[in-house]
Image (spheres, rainbow, N blue to C red):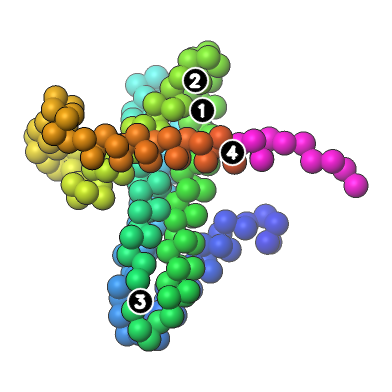
Amino acid sequence: MLRKQPLLLFLVFILVMIVLRIWKSNDVTMGFLVWNIFLAAVPYWFSQALQKQKSKPMYMQTGLFLGWLLFFPNSMYIITDLFHLHERPPIPLWFDLLILLGAAITGLILGYRSLMQVKQWLGIHFSAKAIQFIEPVLFLLCGFGIYVGRYLRWNSWDVFTNPLGITGKMYHLVTDPLVHREAWFITIGFGIFLYLLHSILNNFTSSTYPKN
C-alpha cells in the first residue's frame, strides 16, 4: 500500500498530527489546515474531471479548465501558512513545523499533479511551443492568486459571491502598478519560485534511473 498510495498515507499522517495537536493542547489553531488542504485538492478534482471529459463538448471542457484555473492558486497558497509558525506552548515548535510543512507539501503535490493533467489537455489544443509559454503564465497567475488570498483576503468563490468587489480591486492593481508594487513583487516572486520548483521536480521525475 505504501508504494501505491504514498500521498494518501502522507495526508493521513498530517491529519493525525493535527488531531493529536488539538487533543494535546485543547486548541484548534491548526484546524484551519484541514480546510486549506481540502481547497488544495479542488484543482486536482477539476483536472481529473477534465481528463475524463475529453470527448465532451468544448464548452464543458473549457468550463472545467476555467474552474481549475480559478482554484489552482489554492494548492500553492498553502505554503504561505508557514507564516503561522511560532512558539505555542505546550506544543513544541518542531511539531507545528512538521504539520505546516506537511500541509504545504501536500498542496504543492496536488497542484503540480493537477497541472500535469491540465498540460496533457492543453497538448491536444496547442503546440508544445505554445505550452512552454502558457506554463509560466499560469504560475504568474498563481502568484497573483496567492497575493490576493493572503494579503487581500479574497477567496476563489468571491468571483461568484462578490464579482463587482473583486473586479474593482483587480482593476486598481492592474491600472496603478506603482502604488501596488508589493502586489507585483509578490506575484512575480512566487510565480518564479513555483515555476522553477516545478521544473526541478519535473527533471527528477522524468530522469531515467540506472538499472541495478
Relative to 121, say whether 80 is above or below.
below
Mark 2 neighbour class, 10 Å CA radius: few under 14, some 14 to 19, many 20 or more? some
The answer to whether mark 2 and mark 1 are in CB contact below 8 A is: yes
**Residue under numbered circle 4:** 200
The answer to whether mark 2 and mark 3 are in CB contact below 8 A is: no
- The amino acid on which the numbered mark 1 sits, given as a three-letter code, is Lys
Among the two numbered marks 3 and 1 on one chain, the one whose residue lies closer to the N terminus: 3
Task: Specify the label residue 119 is tagged with.
Answer: 1
Of the pair 21 and 80, the residue shown nearer to us: 80
User: Nearer the observer, disc 4 or disc 2?
Assistant: 4
Disc 4 element: helix
- The amino acid on which the numbered mark 2 sits, given as a three-letter code, is Ile
- The amino acid on which the numbered mark 3 sits, given as a three-letter code, is Glu
In this picture, residue 139 sits left or right of residue 123 = left
Mark 4 neighbour class, 10 Å CA radius: few under 14, some 14 to 19, many 20 or more? few
Among the two numbered marks 2 and 1 on one chain, the one whose residue lies closer to the N terminus: 1
Among the two numbered marks 2 and 3 on one chain, the one whose residue lies closer to the N terminus: 3
**Residue under numbered circle 2:** 131
Disc 1 element: helix
Among the two numbered marks 4 and 2 on one chain, the one whose residue lies closer to the N terminus: 2
- In the image, what residue occupies the spot 33% across and 60% down? 83
For residue 183: magenta? no
Query: Where in the figure is residue 183, as x and y percent of width and height?
Result: 23, 38
Task: Check the image and name the residue furthest to the right.
Answer: 212
Among the two numbered marks 4 and 3 on one chain, the one whose residue lies closer to the N terminus: 3
